[in-house]
Amino acid sequence: SCTYIIQFVLKTAVFYKGFLRISSFGVFLRSFIFSAITVLECMLISFAAGRIQLSNPYAAFVLKGAVSGIIPIAANCLLFCKTDEFSYCIGIAKQIMKRK
């Protein structure tokens, strides 16, 4: 896994500095922030799923799955709803819904 991280860092730095001739600091900062948010979401999911105690293991599994899906979607919508990428994704989803 370290090899992939090093490749990502070096290829990104070389691409931005050598080809685009701009700083790659913003790309790395954004990647770090997204990674930190992902880790925090995983911690929140683990905490919330650990609190679910049901006598029926199937119901507990389904509820934990629902929690594991709802938390990241809600957190990402709240955190990134103002970004251009989010608006673009919503536009694509609307186009797909119109086709059906």
Image (cartoon, rainbow, N blue to C red):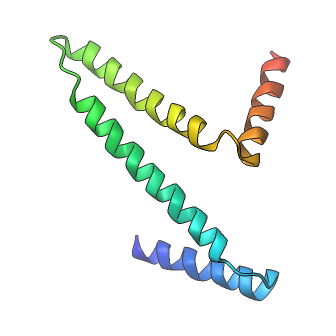
Residue at screen point 40% across, 75% down: 2
Residue at screen point 66% across, 39% down: 81
Query: In this image, 49 relative to 81: left or right?
Result: left
Q: Quadrant of residue 97?
A: top right
Query: Total number of numbered labels?
Result: 0
Residue 79 in picture, x, y percent from top left: 57, 42
The image quadrant where one finds the N terminus is bottom left
Residue at screen point 32% across, 25% down: 64
Identify the residue at the far left of this view. 55
Query: In this image, 1 relative to 80: left or right?
Result: left
Which of 44/55 is in front? 44
Identify the residue at the far bottom of this view. 18
Q: Quadrant of residue 20?
A: bottom right
Which of 61/76 is in front? 76
The image quadrant where one finds the C terminus is top right
Query: In this image, 55 relative to 82: left or right?
Result: left
Quick check: 62 above or below 35? above
Query: In this image, 82 relative to 33: left or right?
Result: right
Residue 75 in picture, x, y percent from top left: 51, 37
Quick check: 81 above or below 53? below
Residue at screen point 45% across, 77% down: 3
